[in-house]
Image (cartoon, rainbow, N blue to C red):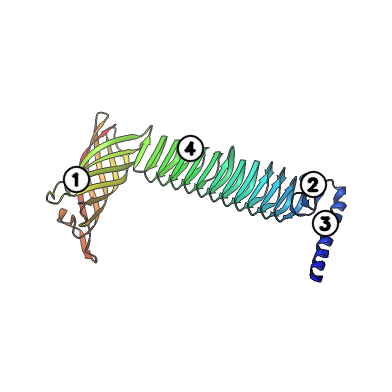
């Protein structure tokens, strides 16, 4: 019982000291060196807490103030009606009316109605009208106007215009941006670089577009993807055959220089055990004369019988001089340099002469050889 009385007296003394200090600061209207409490209005600033500017705040549940100039710490939330020039740390959320000039750290959410200048770190969501600095969130960063900084989110980043990179686990969205890196999808009107696991969409791309599957743009000189739909670029369908007598029909699409390759076909040699082919790759058009150019292509060709009796995987670098008849039809042919890896002998006999070859463990064969390929393609 004596211990309880002693603790109670200590608390009474501490609160009394805070009231005395606040009274001393009354000469500077509505400014407090320290604001300590449980939740509004149970604090040292009482019912007038929303009118005070504090140098330090500590609340077990939630704190309310006009402004913060130092650190404000709350178990659940900090609510600042105007500005914060210090650090806000909350277990759940921080809310600021006008500006933040330092940092916000919250377990769930940071919200600034106007300007967030500094660092926002949240377990789930950061929101601001405009941002200058860094936003990092487990789920989303949302800026309704311009962002002069970097956004990193587990799912989505969104800003009207942004000057620094956007990095998201799923998608980035902006009107005008710098660099976008997303696990699935990027969208922008004007952007320098886009890198996405599946799809990029933009109007004007100044640098490079890299996508796991498809790039779409009005103008993009360097799209790298299996399918590239560029308004000012090229789209072609081709039919080709190589030294293994594998016939491939392919769709080639991209800008004026880089293009992607996606094709499928059939091996004509081994009719007893049909082998079906899938080809993916990237190529480059190198202009030489008005109707003559060099097409350089790096491709990967997979073949299977769909019976589970082996593997065939071939990487090829092809150099194809190409001549265009009129404006649409182009014929091409040239040498290829190939690295082949097979399992259980599938397709090993399609080539008789190897520069080098070896049989390794697990019934695998590896070899390198020089071949040739040629075909015709039509511009769409």
Residue 197 visible (yes or no) = yes
Give the distance between the C-alpha atoms of the residues marked 4 and 2, in whole angstroms: 48 Å
Give the distance between the C-alpha atoms of the residues marked 1 and 2, in whole angstroms: 81 Å
The residue that mark 4 highlights is 188
Label pair 3/1, CB-CB below 8 angstroms: no
Give the distance between the C-alpha atoms of the residues marked 4 and 1, in whole angstroms: 39 Å
Secondary structure found at label 2? helix
| First along the sequence among labels 4 and 1 | 4
Label pair 3/4, CB-CB below 8 angstroms: no
Q: Residues within 10 Å of mark 2 (few under 14, many from 20)?
A: few
Q: x, y percentage for residue 187?
A: 47, 39
The residue that mark 3 highlights is 18
Secondary structure found at label 4? strand
Q: Nearer the viewer, mark 1 or mark 2?
A: 2
Extreme top residue here?
Answer: 326
Secondary structure found at label 3? helix
Residue 18, image quadrant: bottom right
Quick one: 140 or 365, which is closer to the camera?
140
Residue 246 visible (yes or no) = no
Q: Residues within 10 Å of mark 4 (few under 14, many from 20)?
A: many
The residue that mark 2 highlights is 47
Q: Nearer the viewer, mark 3 or mark 1?
A: 3
Q: Is residue 61 left or right of residue 191?
A: right
Q: x, y percentage for residue 1?
A: 80, 70
Q: x, y percentage for residue 295?
A: 28, 41
């Amino acid at each position: 019982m004596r211990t309880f009385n002693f603790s109670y007296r200590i608390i009474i003394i501490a609160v009394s000291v805070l009231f005395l200090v606040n009274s001393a600061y009354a000469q500077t209207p509505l400014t407090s060196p320290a604001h300590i409490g449980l939740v509004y209005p149970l604090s040292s600033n009482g019912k007038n807490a929303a009118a005070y500017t504090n140098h330090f705040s500590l609340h077990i549940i939630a704190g309310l103030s006009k402004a913060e100039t130092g650190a404000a710490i709350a178990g659940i939330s900090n609510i600042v009606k105007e500005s914060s020039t210090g650090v806000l740390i909350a277990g759940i959320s921080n809310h600021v009316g006008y500006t933040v000039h330092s940092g916000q750290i919250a377990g769930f959410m940071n919200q600034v109605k106007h300007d967030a200048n500094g660092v926002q770190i949240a377990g789930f969501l950061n929101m601001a009208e405009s941002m200058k600095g860094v936003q990092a969130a487990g789920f989303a960063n949302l800026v309704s106007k311009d962002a002069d900084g970097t956004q990193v989110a587990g799912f989505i980043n969104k800003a009207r215009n942004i000057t620094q990179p956007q990095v998201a686990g799923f998608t980035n969205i902006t009107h005008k941006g710098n660099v976008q890196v997303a696990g699935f999808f990027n969208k922008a009107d004007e952007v320098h670089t886009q890198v996405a696991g599946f799809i990029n969409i933009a109007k004007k791309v100044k640098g490079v577009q890299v996508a796991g599957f498809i790039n779409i743009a009005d103008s993009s000189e360097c799209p790298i993807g299996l399918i590239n739909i560029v308004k000012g670029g090229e789209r072609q369908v081709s039919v080709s055959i190589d030294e293994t007598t594998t016939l491939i029909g392919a769709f080639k699409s991209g800008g004026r220089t880089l293009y992607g390759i996606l094709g499928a076909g059939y091996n004509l040699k081994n009719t007893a055990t049909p082998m079906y082919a899938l080809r993916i790759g990237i190529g480059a058009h190198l202009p030489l004369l008005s109707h003559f150019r060099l097409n350089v292509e790096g491709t990967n060709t997979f073949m299977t019988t769909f019976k589970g009796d082996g593997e065939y995987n071939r990487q090829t670098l092809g150099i194809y001089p190409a001549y265009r008849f009129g404006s649409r039809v182009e014929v091409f042919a040239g040498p290829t340099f190939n690295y082949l890896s097979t399992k259980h002998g599938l397709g090993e006999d399609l080539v008789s002469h190897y520069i080098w070859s070896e049989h390794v463990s697990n019934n695998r064969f590896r070899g390198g050889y020089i071949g040739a390929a040629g075909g015709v393609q039509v511009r769409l």
